Amino acid sequence: MTQSAIEITGLTKTYKGGRHEPVKHALKGIDLDIPAGSIFGLLGPNGAGKSTMINIMAGLVTKTSGNVRIWGFDQDTNPRQSRAAIGVMPQELNLDPFFTPRGALEVQAGLYGVPRAQRQSDEILEMIGLSDKAEAYARTLSGGMRRRLLLGKALVHAPRVLVLDEPTAGVDIELRQMLWTNIRKLNAEQGMTIILTTHYLEEAEEMCDQIAIINQGSLVVCDSTANLLGKMDAKCMMIDPSEPPSSLPQAPGIEVERRPDGTLALSYHARQTTAEDVLRAVREAGISIRDVKTEQADLEDVFLNLTRST
Ligand code: ADP
Ligand code: MG
């Protein structure tokens, strides 16, 4: 049985405009099902509505209409249970500068009604690498440390679902690695469902097993990462010939380009042409192959294809 961690139906959000601004339809009727146990990527260009959606799930922004169920609990009819099931690491650094990391975790645990005996502040500090800064004031922490503390705060009530809004935007490689290690661990060891937004497509491709793309407040696609990549049918085979070829391969559906370094780039569409067809055309042109590799479409291609403005 695959259970849903999040079920969203008909979700809309309209922001009132200012005095000289029109209203903004940030979400235009989203239906989305996020399976429990997944690492789910929510992608979309700037202004697509990702943060709005995440903040609605988290109970930080009021929706205009629609339904949101978190771990089976309807946000409107079971607000307490649905809130308890989700933890959010926000995009903005919103830490009280007068709290220490331990203090911030304790206050957050208090807000969620976690009894003292069940609090895990030490374990969380250890996990986010802030044990030795436990008593330092937040204002004295580096940007990276504050981000780690935000992750820690999202975890105090041991939520089933962890939501991270652009967790790695603008962070250095070391912190990014640390965040990913932690996120993978929470998913693998505790079965925590992870939902994240990122604009690093490579990161989403590597980390997420499911991906939804939203654009201008509408859902464009939602599928497994493997299926999304599989749908991209443009392929390219790179042939390194043993000797400079006297003639180029020719076959319907195959486009050949000779690169300055002598490589032959053969482009084809996997739906009509197989790799075997391409290799046959190469052999028939009398070319012997020293080396061959293929280039796959990546998520960037999928993304550009789906969000291209019309
Ligand atoms: P994303 O996170 O995908 O970049 P957002 O959810 O932040 O997108 O924003 C979606 C749209 O809603 C944008 O056009 C943004 O300008 C608008 N928006 C976001 N927050 C507010 C707000 N508080 N008031 C008015 N408009 C907003
Ligand atoms: Mg955002």
Image (cartoon, rainbow, N blue to C red):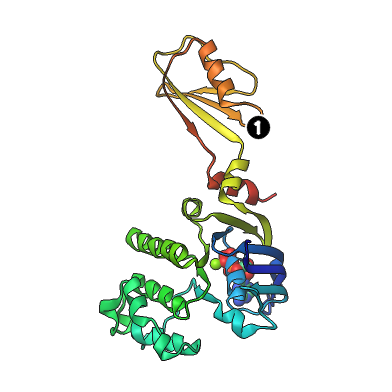
Residue at 55%, 60% (x, y): give it.
40
Ligand 1, seen in the image, is in the quarter at: bottom right
Instruction: Look at the numbered disc 1 and give the secondary structure of its residue.
Output: loop
> Which residue was labeled with disc 1?
271
Residue located farthest toward the front when viewing the structure as drawn: 1
Q: Picture coordinates of residue 54 (x, y %)?
A: 58, 70
Q: From what the image shows, is residue 152 above or below residue 187?
A: below
In the displayed structure, does residue 114 sit left or right of residue 276? Answer: left
Answer yes or no: is residue 60 visible: no
Observer able to see residue 216: yes
- Residue furthest to the left: 132
Residue 146 position, x and y percent, is 37, 75
Identify the residue at image location x=56%, y=50%.
225
In the picture, the quarter occupied by the N terminus is bottom right
Q: Position of residue 33 (x, y in %)?
A: 66, 63
Residue at figure coordinates x 43%, y 65% from the top left: 189
Instruction: Count all numbered tags in the image, as a single digit.
Output: 1
For the residue marked with disc 1, what is the amino acid? Arg
Quarter of the view holding residue 271: top right
The one nearer the camera, 186 or 303, is 186
Between residue 59 and residue 16, name the one nearer to us: 59
> Foreground: 223 or 141?
223
Answer with left or right where residue 150 lies relative to residue 48: left
**Residue drawn at x 34%, y 77% as measured from the top left:** 123
- Mark 1 burial class by Cα count in 10 Å: few <14, some 14-19, many 20+: few
Asked if disc 1 is less than 8 Å from ligand 1, the answer is no
Q: Residue 88: horizontal and vertical position, in percent?
A: 51, 74
Q: Quadrant of residue 21?
A: bottom right
